[in-house]
Image: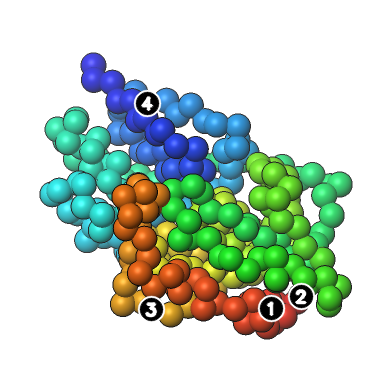
Amino acid sequence: MKTIRVKWRGRGFGEQLILAWLTQILVDNGVDAVFNEKQRVKGLINCPIFDSEIHKNISNHRGDYTTIDIPLHLQHILKCEKYLNRKLKITRNYIPVTFHEIPEIPAVDVVMCTRAGGWTPYRNWPYFNELKKLFDNHRISYVDLNANRIYNHECLNYVKRCKLYIGLDTGTSHYVSKFANGKALILHSGFSPLKWAFTPYEYSFLSGGVYNCAPCWINKRHIKAGNECKFNHKCMKEIKPERVFDVALEYL
């Protein structure tokens, strides 16, 4: 019997969601597969990461699985197909997971995910501190998930009770999707295309300028080699905190 072991050297939360989904797909196709979940991915809810219509042409592709134009979760599928020498049926659009209420968690106006994973700095937005000052000045309550190290069921309970979730192109924004749909604002850079991640969700988006360079895919390895953004991260720096604040008021 062939054994598949997917090794992830980083600590990316989004990749852990993808590997949980991949494990379910492999099991559904009769392949022995075990996902060793990390502490931060315990207590997941149903989390859509695949849209059958949007990704139809991609999922039918069985060519070069290393192409960067194919979403990461489908790259994993293609790698497994090459190893198994057969096509896998994509049986799930969601990761089957759990949720439970934590009554003592307070309801705040805004829940924010202020840091993306360490894969690239270009998914981050530099003005969260300025946005917090605007919220403070107008007595708008908020919680910063990253600053307070809020994960798992606690994270989901905060999002369920809030009026607005402000997030980035990161795993947390997938994780909270069941409770963030219809009340999420994503600050999206030019690092990756929207169709890779957020098309299954009822999310709103704010973007900056210089989109002829997107997707840039400039990660920390490229930066270390001297290939930094030639536009000085304008795609995120052009999203001013006052603009985000004005949009947030529409939800509040």
In contact (CB < 8 Å): disc 2 and disc 1: yes
Query: Disc 2 or 1, which lies upstream in sequence?
Result: 2
How far apart are labels 1 and 3 at the CA level? 22 Å
Instruction: In the rendered view, tell whether residue 245 sits above or below residue 201.
Output: below
In depth, the one of 231 and 89 nearer the eye is 231
Residue 216: percent from the left, percent from the top? Answer: 33, 64
Using the image, tell me which numbered label, if any, was put on residue 134. Answer: 2
Which is more toward the observer, 153 or 209? 209
| Residue type indicated by callout 2 | Leu
Position of the C terminus by quadrant: bottom right
The correct choice, above or below, for 5 with respect to 173 in the image is above
Q: Are marks 2 and 4 in contact (CB under 8 Å)?
A: no
Q: Secondary structure at mark 3?
A: loop
Identified by mark 1, the residue type is Phe
* Residue marked by disc 3: 210
Q: Can residue 17 be seen from the camera position used here?
A: no
Q: Quadrant of the N terminus?
A: top left
Residue 18, picture quadrant: top left
Q: Percent x, y for residue 108?
A: 80, 62
Q: Which residue is mark 4?
A: 33
Mark nearer the viewer, 4 or 3: 3
Q: What x and y, as percent, mark residue 217?
A: 34, 58
Q: Which residue is mark 1?
A: 245
Place of residue 206 in the rendered image (x, y in percent of width and height, measured from the top left): 52, 76
Residue 124 falls left or right of residue 243: left
At x 30%, y 25%, the residue is 4
Q: How dense is the environment of label 3, judged by Cα within 10 Å: few (below 14), some, or many (20 and up)? A: some
Residue that protrudes farthest toward the top in the picture: 1
Q: Is residue 236 left or right of residue 114?
A: left
The first of marks 2 and 3 along the sequence is 2
